[in-house]
Image (cartoon, rainbow, N blue to C red):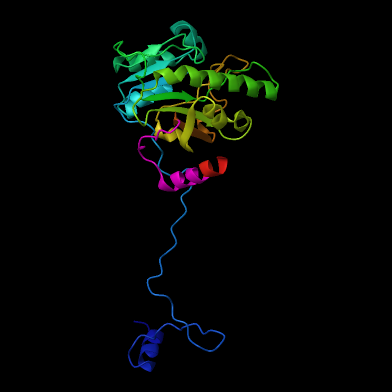
Amino acid sequence: MGKNKRQKLQSSGGRKPKPALAKTQGGRVSKPAPNTPKPKPHIQASQAEPTIPFLFNDQILLIGEGDLSFARSLVENHDCRNVTATVLESGKDELEEKYPHVGENIEVLEAAGAVVKYAVDAMKMPPWTDKKGRGGVGIMDRIFFNFPHVGGKSTDVNRQVRYNQELLVAFFKAALPSLSPKSGSSIIVTLFEGEPYTLWNIRDLARHSGLQVEKSFKFQAKAYPGYKHARTLGVVKSKKGETGGGWKGEERPARSYIFVRKGDKGAPLLGTNKQEEKDDEGEEEADD
């Protein structure tokens, strides 16, 4: 014990001095409130636990899968086996022209028992069966359409908005017959945040199609190791024909919307952040 500290204890009779109490304007002493709860730390969106909007045993249909890296992550990292992944391209050769690395993803999916289907137009697809050919109507528990986009049909923003709205309306109409009648079955669409995507008014498009937003959440690519955003036009190449670099869409803020039939309730989600759920409920009320 230091010399100065011993002197202070001796002057107070050997007892440690009590902390000074603040005085109010009237001269009275105000005591601190007992057991004052500490403020909870704010959780940044990037630190929140990712929301996983499916269960491993769900029948899952993926639309417009691009390079199939999302489907591969479901199989490898989430133990999903009832996966049907679809692409717009007519076959494997055309798909490899756009995404040269896609062959490995296909091998992993097929080895795990997942199904890859080609030439599937999201606007015109028929009711789906499961991978054994059973069912036909109402077989899918989850139908995903991540980052739908018609591609570079026009440089005019208004036309692009209209084209993508037409895509989504037709998709909702085509997907509904394949959605399981079980309560909690859902269609999940992921869009980038900000304009022009907010101009699509996806909530209104869904309402007119007999659906409602059950909730929405931040899409976090880290929940799907190995996933890379695949652009509609394919892998971006430099003037020298080299691939790599370029725009990394998986790092851009995005949001997923869970749609259920009107009057239905969504199934419990895995890894849902409670604060995020609360924020979304407020958002829904404001939109309604």
Does the magenta run of residues contain 269? yes
Tally of numbered tags: 0
Q: Is residue 213 above or below residue 83?
A: below
**Residue visible at 62% across and 19% down in the picture:** 163
Q: Is residue 49 above or below residue 250?
A: below
Q: Which residue is more in the foreground, 53 or 186?
A: 186
Image-based side of 131 in relation to 155, left or right: left
- Asked whether 115 falls inside the magenta stretch, the response is no
Q: Quadrant of the N terminus?
A: bottom left
Position of residue 219 measured from the top left corner of the image (x, y, whole percent): 47, 35
The residue sitting at 68% across, 20% down in the picture is: 159
Please state if 102 lies on the left or on the right of 155 as rendered: left
Please give the range of residues in magenta: 262-282
Residue 26 at least partly seen: yes
Q: Position of residue 8 (x, y in %)?
A: 40, 88
> The C terminus appears in which quarter of the rendering?
top right
Q: Quadrant of residue 73?
A: top left
Picture coordinates of residue 280 (x, y %)?
A: 49, 43
| Residue at horizontal 36 percent and vertical 85 percent from the top | 16
Report if residue 65 is visible in the image: no
